[in-house]
Image (cartoon, rainbow, N blue to C red):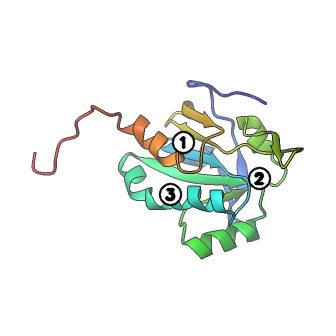
């Protein structure tokens, strides 16, 4: 499994979104992007993670960050997931898991004593130049958004209030 580090060039991708439109990382150049990988649409952990991203879209946008979710699901499954939870951001279909492999988000997992290959829940903050600003491989569903926001607005950094 490849390991991306801070400063590494983010692997390029071009995948279909939940509406069947092609989307690439290059099309987002000039913006920060939260790219997160989840194992399967509409499962408990993936729903928790994706809904947390949905709920944080306003805060992410204030920091100039776009969000993109990626899983091996087909676009039709991604569309149902998006519609069911009103996610409102691109969900990309990495059916052959090539992009997940390039990001180091594909690896050996085990459940009930059975070992198999699958998505390792991961999140990457890509900067405006297409470099990895932060990476979390094996992230918990509830930690994706807090981790990203902590990088964008570190504790102790005082933000001016509206009246200032």
Q: Label 2 vs label 3: CA separation?
A: 21 Å
Q: Which mark is residue 94?
A: 2
Q: Label 1 vs label 2: CA separation?
A: 20 Å
Image point (54%, 42%), residue name: 29
Image quarter where the N terminus lies is top right
Element carrying mark 2? loop
Look at the picture and state if 93 lies above or below 158: below
Q: Which mark is residue 52?
A: 3
- Answer with mark 1 or mark 2, whichever residue precedes in sequence: 1
Residue placed under numbered mark 1 in the picture: 29
- Answer with mark 3 or mark 1, whichever residue precedes in sequence: 1
Q: In the image, which is nearer the foreground, mark 3 or mark 1?
A: 3
- Answer with mark 2 or mark 3, whichever residue precedes in sequence: 3
Q: Residues within 10 Å of mark 1 (few under 14, many from 20)?
A: some
Look at the picture and state if 44 lies above or below 36: below
Q: Residue 65: where, in percent of width, then height?
A: 46, 47
On the picture, is 64 further left or further right than 112? left
Image quarter where the C terminus lies is top left
Q: Residues within 10 Å of mark 2 (few under 14, many from 20)?
A: many
Q: Residue 36: where, in percent of width, then height?
A: 61, 47
Q: Are discs 1 and 2 less than 8 Å apart at CB?
A: no
């Amino acid at each position: 499994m490849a390991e991306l580090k801070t400063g590494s060039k983010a692997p390029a991708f071009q995948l279909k979104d939940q509406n069947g439109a092609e989307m690439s990382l290059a099309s987002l150049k000039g913006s920060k992007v939260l790219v997160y990988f989840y194992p399967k649409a509409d499962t408990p952990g993936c729903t928790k993670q994706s809904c947390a991203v949905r709920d944080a879209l306003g805060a992410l946008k204030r920091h100039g960050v776009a969000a993109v979710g990626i899983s091996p699901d087909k676009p039709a499954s991604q569309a149902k997931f998006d519609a069911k939870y009103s996610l409102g951001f691109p969900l990309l279909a990495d059916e052959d898991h090539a992009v997940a492999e390039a990001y180091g988000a594909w690896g050996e997992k085990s459940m009930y004593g059975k070992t198999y290959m699958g998505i390792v829940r991961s999140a990457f903050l890509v900067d405006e130049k297409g470099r990895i600003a932060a990476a979390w491989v094996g992230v918990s569903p509830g930690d994706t958004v807090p981790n990203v926001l902590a990088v964008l607005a570190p504790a102790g950094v005082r933000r001016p209030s509206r009246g200032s």
